[in-house]
Amino acid sequence: MAASGVEVGSARPSPFGIVGLYSYEAAGGNNLDQAVPAAASLQFLIAAGDALDDVQDGEPVAGLDRQDPAAQAELVAALLALCHYAIASTAARGAPSERVVAASASLARLELAAMSGQHADVNTHAAKTVSLDAARRVTAAKSGSLGRAAAETGAGLATSDTALVDLIGEFGHQWATVVQIANDVSGVWPGGPEDTDISMGRLTIPIAIGLDAGQGAGATRFKDLVRDAASDPEAEKEARAVLWDSGAIHKAWALAGLHYARASRIARELQARNPHSRLHELLTN
């Protein structure tokens, strides 16, 4: 499942865009009109990532022919171009040029980091196995980088204080990691008729915990279930039960709690510095 939870073409604002706006405020920005294009740039970037995810997972992309790779590539390229056009347009709204350049550089750097995470994610799926450490690295690169990008671009338009921008960026990283782990857990129990991450062969953090459980008959059995889940509904059902009974889901929530605590600590520090900061609200919604 995509980190944003936003379908390509959806009018629903991405929470990553909201992170950008709130980060602008937390860094002392007082003209949200300047930050709106930065939030839009994240919307385009997340949409590009979601489209790429769908293409690589073999899922349909709304409005596109699954058998037309050229159209799919054009969509991703167009969304990325719009992403960078949007952040550059903040200059026309009065943002200082040096801050626009810094925000653009942060966006490009973290976009590349997220792409490296996507590449690593594809490789783990091809290998059919992943360790918990590797799954955490993928999440940090793929989702954490996007959260940091949202926070750094918003904050970078409001201040030239690099230490403050980095602190707010770290909040974005931790927040996005919590969101992704929650998404991973819901991918095991989606609560509807859609396929689960197990049946789709996605080696997310809860599944990595199960695969990383050690040696013995139980561990081997779970690996066999994950392997067979795509074609055998009973294997998928049993794999879900194993994840619950083994405590893998609970461990995933505990890991999310660790990142939540880190994000919460930073949010409190930022609110103490600036009472107008609303980043803490992202941890309660």
Image (cartoon, helix red, strand yellow):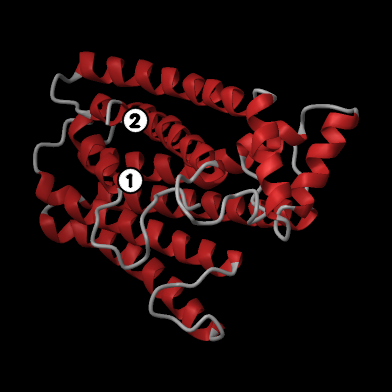
Give the residue at x 53% y 54%. Answer: 112
Q: Residues within 10 Å of mark 2 (few under 14, many from 20)?
A: many
Q: Amino acid at mark 1?
A: Phe
| In contact (CB < 8 Å): disc 1 and disc 2 | no
- Left or right: 177 as drawn, with respect to 124: left
When asked about the image quadrant of residue 242, the answer is top right
150 w.r.t. 75: above or below: above
Distance from Cα at disc 1 to Cα at disc 2: 13 Å
Question: Is 80 situated left or right of 234 in this image?
Answer: left
In this rendering, does residue 136 appear at all?
no
Specify the label residue 16 is tagged with: 1
Q: Which mark is residue 168?
A: 2
Residue 187 in percent (x, y) is at 53, 45
What residue do we see at 54% from left, 47% from top? 142
> Residue 6: image x %, image y %?
36, 55
Image coordinates for residue 139, horizontal then vertical, percent:
56, 41
Under circle 2, the secondary element is helix
User: Camera-side residue: 164 or 209?
Assistant: 209
Helix, strand, or loop for circle 1? helix
Of the residues shown, which amino acid type is indicated by label 2? Answer: Ile
Q: Nearer the viewer, residue 82 or 143?
A: 143
